[in-house]
Image (tube, grey):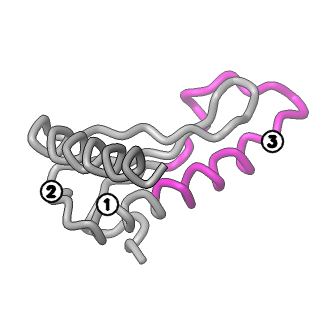
Amino acid sequence: MCDFGGDDFEVEGLDPDALLWVRGVDYLAGWREAARVAAELGDVLAAVGVDLEGAKLQASTTADGSGVVRLELPAATAREIAKLARAAAAQRRKAG
């Protein structure tokens, strides 16, 4: 499993000063879910051999409290992921 917040990724926490808080909205639940998914995505990308140096996965929330994962990648890494996705799509079409 990816060491969430470790050397593999820069995952930033929820910044209370950067948000307009709405009473009754559970922002932390959305952020926690996004943080779990960000770690899972990082683990999967690493498992398939994607070079994640310079990649950033950031957990955040929307105004309604839904979790959001922001992914920032070097262009070469994005190209590598696109290549893997195209190969997976082609394999899926063959199987279908």
Determine the CA span between mark 2 and mark 1: 12 Å
Q: Amino acid at mark 1?
A: Leu
Q: Amino acid at mark 3?
A: Asp
What x and y, as percent, mark residue 2? 38, 72
Nearest to the eye among marks 2 and 3: give it: 2
- Circle 2 residues within 10 Å: few <14, some 14–19, many ≥20: few
Q: Which residues are magenta?
A: 13-38
Residue shown at the point (54%, 28%) measured from the top left: 18
Residue shown at the point (43%, 37%) measured from the top left: 70
Looking at the image, residue 66 sits to the left or right of residue 50; the answer is: right
Which secondary structure lies at badge 2? loop
Give residue 23's mark.
Answer: none
Nearest to the eye among marks 1 and 3: give it: 1
Are dots 2 and 3 in contact, CB under 8 Å?
no
Q: Is residue 62 above or below residue 77?
A: above
Give residue 26's mark.
Answer: 3
Label whose residue precedes the other's in the sequence (2 or 1): 1
Residue shown at the point (51%, 46%) measured from the top left: 59
Q: How many marks?
A: 3
Looking at the image, residue 93 sits to the left or right of residue 33; the answer is: left
What x and y, as percent, mark residue 32? 64, 55
Q: Is residue 29 magenta?
A: yes
- Circle 3 residues within 10 Å: few <14, some 14–19, many ≥20: some
Q: Amino acid at mark 2?
A: Glu
Which secondary structure lies at badge 3? loop
The residue carrying mark 1 is 45
